[in-house]
Structure formats: C-alpha cells, structure tokens
Image (cartoon, rainbow, N blue to C red):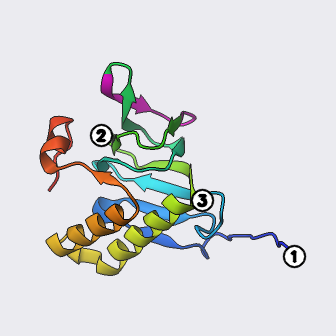
Amino acid sequence: MIQVTQIFKHGQRTVLDLADGNRMELLSSPTEDAYCVVMGTIPPGGGVPLHSHPDAESFYVLSGDVEALVQTTGGLEWQRLVPGDFIHIPAGVKHAWRNRSIEPMSALITCTAKLGRALQEMGQLASTLGSEFPSPAAIRRIAEISEGYGHWLASPEENSAVGIHLA
C-alpha cells in the first residue's frame, strides 16, 4: 500500500469552537496512529479546568500569555508561559490552564492520536450545541466521553481550590 502525503490547507481544517471561547483546530488527522497536532486558543479570561488523561501532550506557545497549573516537586503550581515557551505534560499528570491577560493565547499542541480523537469528540459536541453549551446535559456528556477515554476531571470544589471558578 502506498503512503501518501497529507496536506491540511488553511480554511479546510476541522475547527471546533468550545466552551468559553476556547477553540481547537485540528492540523493533522486524529486517525493517524502516532500523533495528532492541534492549534489551541484560549481567549482572555478563558481557561481549561483541572484534569488529567493517560496520554502525554506538549504545547508550544505561539502568541499571548497564559498560566499553566503544573505538577512540580512541591505540588501543583501556576506557571506563566509566553510566546516561545514549551511545556510537556506527561501522561496521567494533573494540569489546567487560565488566561488572565487581555490577549488570546495560541499554542501548537502535539498529543497522541487517541487524545486527539477524544478532543475531537468533545469539541464536536461543544460545537454542535453552540449557545446550549455548557448545559448540565452537555457537561454530563463531556464527562462520559472523558471517562470513556480514561480521563480524570476535577470537581468544582477541586477546581476552586486551585483558583479556577466554574460558571
């Protein structure tokens, strides 16, 4: 079987608009066996709640200013990231994101194809619901998808304890 090169042209890629203005653009196919590449954007005031998953992921910050809640030898700590910074989050490690700046943050994300498929499935759900997201039913469905992929999601109390206040 001949392997062919894939080109994903701007304007022809899958774009998933998520809750709170977060956005993902799939730069490679999550059906690949090895990895998936995603362009992620967190708007000013946006973030991603505390979670973990059994797959590693890496982020290269392209623009903006963001804080990542990361595991250190001293426990979970917020770290500021700016353009040019790179962060690798090992499999199973708890992490979160928040953008306290006035500019959107964009990052190039590489992850396993499995994590890419999970992100795509959650993103498609959020995109199809539009203004209905995040309804209680949609949040339950995101939790079910996450559980199916082996992800852990923090409770509202656990998020509040690290400075993330969910609506």
* Residue neighbourhood size for the residue with mark 2, other residues' Cα within 10 Å, grouped as few (<14), some (14–19), many (≥20): some
Q: The N terminus is located in which quarter?
A: bottom right
Residue with the mark numbered 1 = 2
In reply to whether residue 78 is colored magenta, the answer given is yes
> Can the viewer see residue 161?
yes
Q: Earlier in the sequence, mark 1 or mark 2?
A: 1
What residue is drawn where x is 39% and y is 24%?
A: 72
Q: Secondary structure at mark 3?
A: strand
What residue is drawn where x is 29% and y is 68%?
A: 144
- Residue 117 lies, with reference to residue 2, above or below; the image says above
What's drawn in magenta, residue-wise? 75-86
**Residue 125 on image: x %, y %:** 35, 75
Residue with the mark numbered 2 = 100
Q: What amino acid does circle 1 point to? A: Ile
Discs 2/3, front: 3
Q: What amino acid does circle 3 point to? A: Cys
In front here: 33 or 136? 33
* Residue neighbourhood size for the residue with mark 3, other residues' Cα within 10 Å, grouped as few (<14), some (14–19), many (≥20): many
Horizontal arrangement in the rendering, residue 104 relative to residue 111 (left or right):
left
What residue is drawn where x is 82% and y is 73%?
A: 4
**Residue 31 on image: x %, y %:** 61, 70
**Residue 6 on image: x %, y %:** 75, 70
Marks 1,2: beta carbons within 8 A: no
Q: What amino acid does circle 2 point to? A: Arg
* Residue neighbourhood size for the residue with mark 1, other residues' Cα within 10 Å, grouped as few (<14), some (14–19), many (≥20): few
In front here: 10 or 27? 27
Q: Earlier in the sequence, mark 3 or mark 1?
A: 1
